[in-house]
Structures are given as C-alpha cells and as structure tokens.
Image (cartoon, rainbow, N blue to C red):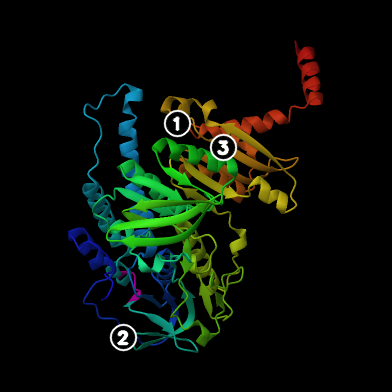
C-alpha cells in the first residue's frame, strides 16, 4: 500500500496538494541543454531555481514529493503554527498573574488547532507552487530525478541535459537503532502534523530542538509528556539547557535524561518504552511515540556514483564553495550542510547561484550562522560558545546580562534568561552570542549583523533601543563592556581632568 503524501485529505490539504504536487500533471518536454538542473524543491532548490531563472538562465527543477520541502510541509511552518497556539494556551493559564480571570479555566480544541495550522499552511503554499515557478520561467518536473552519467538527469524517462546541476534533495527524520522501533507506528516531524486528536500520553525520544519544541507544545495542549534522551539540547551550554529544563519541569514534562533506550513494544494501541537511567531499569507507557532524533541526508537513489559525486551517511561531500567532487555539480541545503536550517538552505542557495552561473568564489566558511530553538523561552545562538573558543585555542572573555535586570522583561513577567557574549580577550570583538528570552530569535540578528561587519560589542551601547524592550539587554551588554575599559588608571586621569575643569 502506497504511503499517502499527506493526511487528512481535507479541503486545506487538497489546496496544498494542488499547489505543491498537482495531479494529474504533465512534465515538460526537454528542449536543449539547461544552464542549471536542480534536484529538490525545498528551500535551497526553490531559491536556486527562482534566482537563476530571474537572471536569465534556463532552469529545470525536479521534485518527487512536495514542493516547499520540509519547511512548508513538515517543518518550520506547521511547527510554528502549533507552537504559537501552545503559547496562547500558556498565556491564558497565566492570566491570573496579571489580574485577568477566565472563569471556568482553559480548554483546548486540538482539532481546531490542527485545522488552523493546515489552513495557514495551505494559504502559504502558493509561494512554493508549481504554477508560480512555471510563471517564473522554470521547467518544473514532478518525479524522481536521478543522475544518468555524464551531464544528464533522468526524470521519469525524460533526459535533462545540464551545464551545471545542484543537489538540493534535503533530509528526512533520522531513525534510531532501538530494538522494536521498526515494528511500531511511531511519529516523526513528517507525520505528527497529520494528527487530528491529541494523544493522552506522549513519549518523545530525543531532546534536540524538534523533540523539545514539540514536546513542550503538546504538554501545553494537555498531553502527558515524557522526554527520554541521552542528552538535552546538546548544542547549547549547560546554563542555557538548565533554564529550558526548569521551564519544562514547571510545565509538567517528565524528563528522563542520561537514558539508554533498550526496546520499544506495541500492544494494540499502547506503546511500552524500556530504558535505563544510571543502571536502573524503567518503563514509560504511551499512546503515541514521537521520534526526535535529528535528520538524515537524502542521498539514496540519486545515482551519485554514476557522476562521481562523493557522499557519506552525513550527506553530499562539498568544498567551501559548495562544489562536489564532480566540478559540474554543486549542492545546497540540508543534504550537504551540518547546519540543517531553512535560513542556511537559503544562504547556501545564494552562494551556489553565484558560484555556478558566474564563476564566483563565495565561501560557506565566511557565513556567521545563527540558529534558534523555539521553546519557551527561546534559545538563539551565533558563533562560538566559550568552551568552543577555548578548544580552538582562542583566548576569550565572557559577559552576561540577565533578563531580570531588563525592565521590559520584568514587566512582561519573563525574567528567565540572559544575553551572553563571548569576546576575543582584550577587545570587544564578538566571537559568539547566546540569547535566552521569550523572543530570542527576533533579537539574535543584531549580533549576526555586528559579526558580519566587525562591529564590536561596545558599539551596542551607542545604539539607541526603544524603551522598554527586551532587546535592551543588548545595549546593557555594550554598557557592561565599556565599563571594563574604565581601569583604575583611566579613572584617575578622568578625576584629575574633571577636578581641573571645576
């Protein structure tokens, strides 16, 4: 039985499919060589194809699944719709702190929440639609694309010749080698958005960004959530992770960390997860199991061997210019990047356009890449953590301002968190920054801009921020740095100068 492309097949998802995987659909007939053939119509592929066509290139775009890729269909768009709904629930439950009375309490209609998500996703899908890209001059092929040697991609028996090609096939939910996992019907980010009923008990396997974001959202909707994982937000430092752990505990999420999962079994509609923590055997029972174990690059079935493109389990191997081991073929996005984010797919696509069409030499290593985990509070980061700087042999100092010292955070009742800067020792040059705050993702861009243009932390103090905003924490960081420049010697000089001017 064929797996459906998406479910449930309501009017919203029918609209989505009509845009991103129309059926019936007749592929174009190739006529002459393409300047660029792009395999994969996620963020990286879409941006590459649209920009190249806009510059006058003859472009073919190949997609076997859904135009829009993970971001539109199973990633950023649906997950943030759910997270926004879960924050509304949380704010309603906190309303009493602000003197707001809600009467009989807060109830969640999960079906309506999911319907809203599907409606919004469908309304946004026009931007990524087959029709739009054809109107941009792109030849869109629906089907499985495979390199057929030389400079040819085969799509459903049609041969697409190219001068350059771009692999933008993305990634999928990674599995785990857990006994019994392949025997059960578990959820991933690819089918969790198909749910129409809230599971009463949810066990999340893995505490990376996907597991943490969705685990907190489902808990706030009313599910009993247990997170079982060996580690917790492993890319973040200990202080950051501890704040998120405390937020989860207050929400009522059960955290089972440093856990080794031994087996999973299913009996009727109930799942049993067996694991060990510190040598103690434990079990968790669930109505649904969500696997949040990260992502695996889509390299299978592309015929990469036939064109000499080296790849590993981690993805397509590229150099700093995103060129593969075949000089005619490049890659962009999740299939080749260790930073599997939509904004990185966007950035790498822009590099590929310049390097494939205009003999550019743009480098990935020149990028300062931020990321954000959309828990509550959010965690945003760019550059190096202090320990990473130390491991790299870079002498660094750190500065931290806590949100409890920021007026707007106090007024918002959101004092958990901080802004933490890592500086090159003896200067205000930013090596990295971490922000933990309600809207950290909206704030981290200021640090990225500073790093891109070599603007020191001291300049943040001279940047006027509207008062009161939580972003004022960045100005306070600048003030904190400038105070360190007032050494005892400098202070004595100022005292003598001011005394002379009295």
Of badges 2 and 1, nearer the viewer stands 1
Rendered location of residue 273, percent (x, y): 41, 56
User: What label does residue 414 carry, if any?
Assistant: 1
Report helix, strand or loop for mark 2.
loop
Residue 103 x %, y %: 22, 26
Name the mark nearer the viewer: 3 or 1.
1
Cα separation, mark 2 vs mark 1, equals 58 Å
Give the left or right position of residue 51, taking residue 121 as reference.
Answer: right
Residue 340 x %, y %? 49, 60
Nearest to N terminus: mark 2 or mark 1: 2
**Label 1, residues with CA under 10 Å away: few <14, some 14-19, many ≥20:** some
The CA span between labels 3 and 1 is 14 Å
The percent coordinates of residue 470 (x first, y second) are 48, 33
Q: Which residue is mark 3?
A: 419
Q: Is residue 467 visible?
A: no
Answer yes or no: do the residues labelled 3 and 2 have beta carbons within 8 Å?
no
Q: Earlier in the sequence, mark 3 or mark 2?
A: 2
**Residue 425 within the magenta-colored segment of the rendering:** no
Closer to the camera in the image, 123 or 198: 198
Q: Residue furthest left?
A: 11
Which one is nearer the viewer's eye here, 345 or 11?
11
Residue range in magenta is 135-140
Quarter of the rendering occupied by the N terminus: bottom left
Q: Earlier in the sequence, mark 3 or mark 1?
A: 1
Label at residue 38: none
Which image quadrant for residue 105? Answer: top left
Judging by the rendered image, the residue that carries numbered circle 2 is 29
- Secondary structure beneath label 1: loop
């Amino acid at each position: 039985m064929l797996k459906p492309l998406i479910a449930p097949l309501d009017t919203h998802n029918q609209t989505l499919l009509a845009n991103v995987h129309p059926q019936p659909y007749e592929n174009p007939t190739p006529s002459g060589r393409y300047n660029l053939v792009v395999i994969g119509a996620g963020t990286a592929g879409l941006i590459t194809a649209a920009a190249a066509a806009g510059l006058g290139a003859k472009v073919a775009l190949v997609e076997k699944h859904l135009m829009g890729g993970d971001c539109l269909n199973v990633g950023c768009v649906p997950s943030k719709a759910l997270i926004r709904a879960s924050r509304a629930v949380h704010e309603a439950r906190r309303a009493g702190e602000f003197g707001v009375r809600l009467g009989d309490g807060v109830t969640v209609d999960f079906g309506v929440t999911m319907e809203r998500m599907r409606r919004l996703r469908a309304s946004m899908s026009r931007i990524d639609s087959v029709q739009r890209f054809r109107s941009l001059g792109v030849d869109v092929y629906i089907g499985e694309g495979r390199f057929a040697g030389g400079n040819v991609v085969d799509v459903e028996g049609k041969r697409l010749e190219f001068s350059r090609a771009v692999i933008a096939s993305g990634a999928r939910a990674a599995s785990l080698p857990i006994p019994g996992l392949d025997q059960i019907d578990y959820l991933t980010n690819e089918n969790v958005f198909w749910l129409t009923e809230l599971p009463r008990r949810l066990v999340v396997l893995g505490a990376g960004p996907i597991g943490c974001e969705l685990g907190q959202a489902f808990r706030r909707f009313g599910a009993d959530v247990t997170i079982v994982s060996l580690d917790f937000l492993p890319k973040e430092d200990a202080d950051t992770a501890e704040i998120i752990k405390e937020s989860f505990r207050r929400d009522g999420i059960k955290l089972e960390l440093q856990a080794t999962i031994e087996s999973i079994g299913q009996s009727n509609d109930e799942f049993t997860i067996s694991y060990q923590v510190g040598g103690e055997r434990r079990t968790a029972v669930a109505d649904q199991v969500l696997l949040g174990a990260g992502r695996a690059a889509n390299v299978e079935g592309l015929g990469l061997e036939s064109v000499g493109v080296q790849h590993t389990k981690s993805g397509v191997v590229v150099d700093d210019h995103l060129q593969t081991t075949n000089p005619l073929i490049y890659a962009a996005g999740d299939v080749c990047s260790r930073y599997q984010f939509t904004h990185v797919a966007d950035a790498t696509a822009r590099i590929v356009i310049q390097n494939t069409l205009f003999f550019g030499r743009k480098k990935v290593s020149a990028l300062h890449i931020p990321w954000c985990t959309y828990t509550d509070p959010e965690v945003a980061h760019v550059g190096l953590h202090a320990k990473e700087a130390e491991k790299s042999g870079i002498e660094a100092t750190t500065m931290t301002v806590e949100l409890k010292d920021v007026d707007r955070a106090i007024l918002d009742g959101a004092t958990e968190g901080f802004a933490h800067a890592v500086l090159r020792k003896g200067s205000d040059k930013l090596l990295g920054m971490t922000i933990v705050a309600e809207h950290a993702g909206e704030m981290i861009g200021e640090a990225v801009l500073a790093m891109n243009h070599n603007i020191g932390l001291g300049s943040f103090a001279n940047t006027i921020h509207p008062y009161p905003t939580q972003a004022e924490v960045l100005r306070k960081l600048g003030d904190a740095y400038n105070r360190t420049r007032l050494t005892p010697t400098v202070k004595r000089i100022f005292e003598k100068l001011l005394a002379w001017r009295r």
